[in-house]
Image (spheres, rainbow, N blue to C red):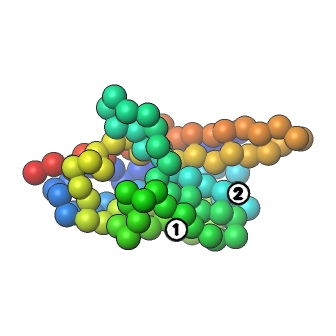
Amino acid sequence: QVHLVESGGGLVQPGGSLRLSCLASGIIFSINNVHWYRQAPGKQRELVAAITSGGSTDYADSVKGRFTISRDNAKNTVYLQTNSLKPEDTAVYYCNSNIEDSGLWYAYWGQGTQVTVSS
């Protein structure tokens, strides 16, 4: 059974930093692509960052240069380092991985972690 558990969110002042973590069980992150999404109140969920099984990364334009996605294979954990946070970064952040099994794709999501950027 696959479980993704996010942690590391919280309340931070503008310009501050947080490191979000996504711990996986039931799947091996090193051989799967992993994504961080976020959803602000009243808005659609948006893709923030992605890391492929090969280690390539990609970011939404709104976070380029401020956020960094990385992976610790030994801990089966993916991180999202968020720096220079802005009030518009306030959202629930979700970890996602899509797994192929016998020709079918399954989307797995964590429960989310709240990031609030406010003075």
15 left or right of 70 in image: left
Residue 65 appears at what percent x and percent y? 38, 70
**Measured Cα–Cα span from mark 2 to mark 1:** 13 Å
Where disc 1 sits, the SS reads strand
Q: In the depicted view, which residue is nearer to us: 80 or 5?
A: 80
Observer-nearest residue: 43 or 22? 43
Q: Is residue 109 above or below residue 74?
A: above
Counting residues from the N terminus, which is met first, the one under dot 2 or under dot 1? 2
Q: Residue at x 42, y 59 (%)?
A: 61
Q: Is residue 58 visible?
A: yes
Q: Residue at the far right: name it.
A: 102
Is 23 in front, or is 80?
Answer: 80
Q: Which residue is mark 2?
A: 32
What is the three-letter code of the residue carrying label 1?
Ser
* Quarter of the figure with residue 76: bottom right
The amino acid sitting under disc 2 is Asn
Position of 29 with respect to 77 (left or right) is: right
Query: Left of 4 or right of it: where is 18?
Result: left
Do we see residue 28 in this rendering? no
Badge 2 marks a residue whose secondary structure is: loop
Give the residue at x 37% y 57%. Answer: 62
